[in-house]
Amino acid sequence: MVGKTKGFYVRDWPLHLGWNNIRYIIEASLLHAELLDRVLVVPTVVYARACEFDKLTCQAYAKMVNRGDALQSDEWRDSPIEKQWAWLIPTELMMDLALIQRTRPLMTTADYLLLHDLPASLETAKGNWDREAYHSSSDTGLHVIPNGNYDNGISRVDRMPAGWEAAVEEGNKGEGLGKKIREVLEGKTTEEWETVKNQVGRGESEEVLERELRKVGAYVLHTWQGSHGMEYVRTVTEPIKQVSLGEGMKGFWDDYHHITKEVLLLEGETHYWRKPGSLRFTTVPAQTSFAKMVLRDIMPPPVLNAMAIRLDQRMTEKVGGRMWTSAHMRRGDFIHHEWVMNQDGYAHFNRIKEWMGKGRDVLVDIKNSGKVEMYPVPGAVPDESFKTMEPPKKNDPFYLATDERNDTMIAYFKEHGAVMVNDLITPEDRRELAAWSLVFTDVLGVMEQTLLARAGYFYGHALSSVAGGAVNHRGSLNKDPRTTKID
């Protein structure tokens, strides 16, 4: 596998982040590695932040560590001791790595170390690439991309368009359209397509306007819409266009494809506030290729997918064979950060209950109209469930995925229509599917994310990366975009 490539692409993995953020970084890194024809090296393990049972039981399944000690951070020092524990979970239990390896070169850090005659125990607990220990057994060449070189002050793209330098020179003459473009984009790395079209367009078709922009060194870039002006959900289901000046762009392939060192390291954090892929695309085919990877190749492990299918069937039975609605209710650390929709848990739940009613109305309207829409994603086909299933009835229960653990509050949720994971899953399920890893809430969260994607209607929160994964999976399952609400 390695011999067919130019070497390795590696990262300083921020393992203090939750799983969904790590998954987004893996998605972006797979893109980067593919652009540069390199093998991506991913962390061998990630940290599960909580366990459903007592710590002695959980220790029988995975190694337990103190998060602050392992990650060399004081973030959790003032928390109760039970909130400071974490468990080491193999990455392959969170994501179907074997599926990715069928089409893309990828290995874990432990694989890399063993391949270089180094013990796997050298892998750092924080996830950073150890520039000395990882290169101690041989003269392995290392090239480091400084963090500030990634996209500081520029628009990072996959590849620069052909002839961009000559076009920029033409546009910089300060005449006509080139002058107008520079006035619109002054001081900005990118601008929204609609803004440019409204201020610069002269009634031309979009195709003609794009061609005119290219002539003066301004380029249409392809990416996806964030949610509520933020970039937490990283969905690839709503493609958009933006515009940037050629001199304000840098191509990842152009800057680094010529590096001959065996290992290419992108230093530090390049995740927050970036678009999916952590860059923009200069062509639609490149954008489409990345969307296909996210929607078709980034999947949960088969055991978690099988569990989600089984629980989907049970939820359908609970509502008499009709479609069912679902919601993700993030509490826990979101309360501390004041990122919840309502600080009060009961008010938060009642807000969700209201949206479940609206979701039922949406499903009824789609069923009655007979017109099913699709996400603008590769390979989309109409959702057939509207032909075979009836929408929910007014008092049907709904599925609630939440990290709330207050017994009194959970009892209230259930009294008012919520069905939760432990109402559906059985010990036999865990035994038959060898799903022991579900004792850890991070693994359980991946399964629930997959289950939420199968619901007739889904409600999530724009500040939660869990919602983004569910929406992308809904795109891959051909759900009607009107059946998803990100609040």
Image: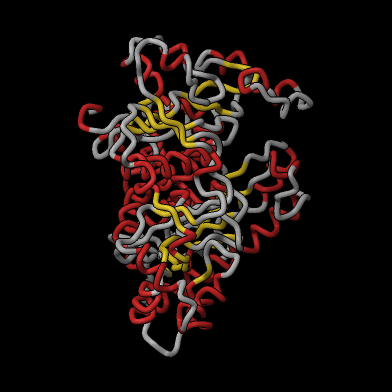
**394 left or right of 299 in image:** right
Please identify the quarter of the rendering in which residue 41 is found.
top left
Farthest bottom residue in view: 203
Residue 224 at what x, y percent from top left?
Answer: 46, 61
Q: Is residue 23 above or below residue 48?
A: below
Name which residue lies at 31% across and 37% down. Answer: 100
**Residue 98 occupies quadrant:** top left
Task: Spot the residue most to the left.
Answer: 4
Above or below residue 168? Residue 370 is below
Between 253 and 306, the residue placed more toward the observer is: 253
Between 459 and 46, the one nearer to me in the picture? 46
Residue 398 shows in this picture: no
Q: Quadrant of residue 220?
A: bottom left
Where 305 sits versus 117, above or below? Answer: below
Specify whether residue 86 is in view: yes
Q: Residue placed at 61% from the left, 13% from the top? A: 56
Q: Nearer the viewer, residue 391 or 359?
A: 359
- In percent of width and height, residue 361 lies at 53, 71
Where does the image place residue 217, in percent across and percent down from the top left?
41, 69
Of residues 11 and 85, the one nearer the viewer is: 11
x, y percentage for residue 195?
53, 77
Q: Residue at x 43, y 63 (%)?
A: 246
Seen as rendered, the residue at the extreme front is 173
